[in-house]
Image (cartoon, rainbow, N blue to C red):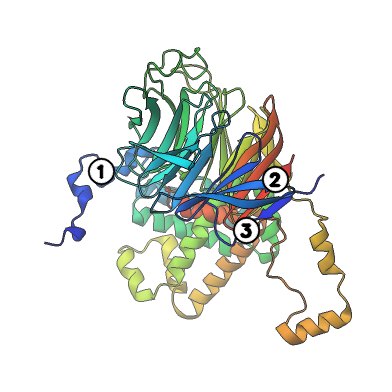
Amino acid sequence: MNWRTINVDLFDPESPANFDISSLLPSIPSVSASEVQTLSSQIKQLLRGGDSEGALRGALENAPYGGDAQAKDVHLATVVETLQSIKQSDMSPMLSRMYGSEGGPETLDVLMKYLYKGMAHTSQPSSGRSSMTPQATGGFSQIQSRGGGEGGGQAMSVLLSWHEKLVEIAGAGSIVRVMTDRRTV
Amino acid sequence: MISPDVHHLFHHPIADHSFSADRQTLAVARDNNVELYSRSGNKFSLQDELKGHDKTVTSVDIAPSTGRIVTCSQDRNAYVWEPSPSGWKPTLVLLRINRAATFVRWSPSEKKFAVGSGARVIAVCYFEEENDWWVSKHLKKPIRSTITTVAWHPNSVLLAAGSTDAHARVFSSFIKGVDARPESSVWGERLPFNTVCGEFLNNSAGWVHGCAFSPSGNALAFTAHDSSITVVYPSGPDEPPTAVVSLSTQLLPFLSLIWNGESEIIAAGYDCEIYRLRGNEQGWQIVGSMESKGRPGLEEMREESALNMFRQMDLKGKSKDDTQLKTVHQNTIATIRTYDEAGGTVRKFSSSGVDGRVVIWST
């Protein structure tokens, strides 16, 4: 037996391999899929009413960290839809206003998380997506139609221009926080 | 502002540096050795090498009054080096750890030092007269990951430690027979060994790079990999802290920080630049960079002749040589330390980093 390949940590009762990391982190309340669904329709209502900043803020401040993968996908769709509805010329002023407000830097960090998640999603081939979301929900079907091909490119370009504007305001620190933060979206 | 005193020692990363009390000797950790430089005029020249570790030296610290040097390395050992007629004499320290030693600092009393390690323990080391040997006691609970940094409270009993489990903790490292019983403070009254006096986590749970007590010892600041600085103001034993101020910056993460008085912090890291922060229990703000913008080196680049510009375009395909950063340090700053202080106010501090430079700054 090659002793170099033995995983010594398994024999150590104090090893982190035998230890649940989640007990170290601040607890995250769990969120059900129906709550995310309700939130999504509230945000769409704000969007229809023309309050896109309120819609974006509402979507980012209520990110479902404790939701399952499906709930998170539904919320991603809501955020991306909100982002797509905002004109390019409105992006920078809106981001500056949000950054300056109470809790603004954290809100923009959440936006950065959604930008990266959105980019990861739109760049996936559309065949992979169907297995991820067995039930197409109202909000999600919109992105799905934009998946692959021309539509995916368009969603990506929206996300990229948001990313550019966001880095100008929130800086590289915001990107670093997406990588370190254990509260994933 | 007086321009910083730059010493480019070599083209190699400096893991840690430390000055002797008279500031004539500089110890830098380079690969498996520690190099000792002595000041001659305005320059530092290589004087001696401390050879003994067989893996990368991660940290070095010179005790100001005894002159002893402690080093620790990824080879899981720490040595205490003492001057003798035949050169520096190393004494092995019994750390009893099975992973790399990552960080070492003498306590202000210089009777003890603390070694952080990847074995999820902090070895608090002290000299045992009867065995003529440096021995250690382990601070174990509730550390769940590698210790990246330690910092001593002025009373030499309390020890702050930052870890990759994203927590900054304050422990008691009281050792009977070595330490005098400490006066009770905001951190606690009775402090037997391994009392956890505080455990702090920042919002996004980034791992901790650096921590430091304020000069009074009544506040703790730590910097983490989520580009944040968190300052904790404890209120008393077993009570929630008066204030925990967390500042998320727009910059890359800071690796090291020092206090200048009770209301200023100087921090540096991956941005290759040194920043000054000011604040109190209500909040902290970045005031600005310590780099003076009108340094001579930058002016020269602007005053280029047209001939020179076209020649550069012809030779290199660009008119400006942009391989140099506009900062003094040309790479990540790993360590900053106080160089000259009085009563908690820092007049000068030193920085070292991946670019092989040691820089002395005036505040």
Have a look at marks 2 and 1 and say if they share a chain. Answer: no
Tell me, for residue A166, which label it has, or none: 3
For numbered disc 1, what is the local secondary structure? loop
Q: Earlier in the sequence, mark 3 or mark 1?
A: 1
Have a look at marks 2 and 3 and say if they share a chain. Answer: no
Tell me, for residue A15, which label it has, or none: 1
Q: Which residue in the structure is indicated by mark 2?
A: B360
State the image quarter where residue B311 is shown: bottom right
For the residue marked with disc 1, what is the amino acid? Answer: Ser
Position of residue B32 relative to residue B362, above or below, is below
Q: Is residue A43 left or right of residue A12?
A: right
Have a look at marks 3 and 1 and say if they share a chain. Answer: yes
For numbered disc 2, what is the local secondary structure? strand
How far apart in space, not on screen, are marks 2 and 3 (Cα)?
A: 36 Å
How far apart in space, not on screen, are marks 3 and 1 (Cα)?
A: 40 Å
For the residue marked with disc 2, what is the amino acid? Answer: Ile
For the residue marked with disc 3, what is the amino acid? Answer: Leu
Q: Observer-nearest residue: B305 or A138?
A: B305
Pointer 3 chain: A
Image location of residue B238, percent across then percent down: 43, 18
Nearest to viewer (mark 3 / mark 1): 1
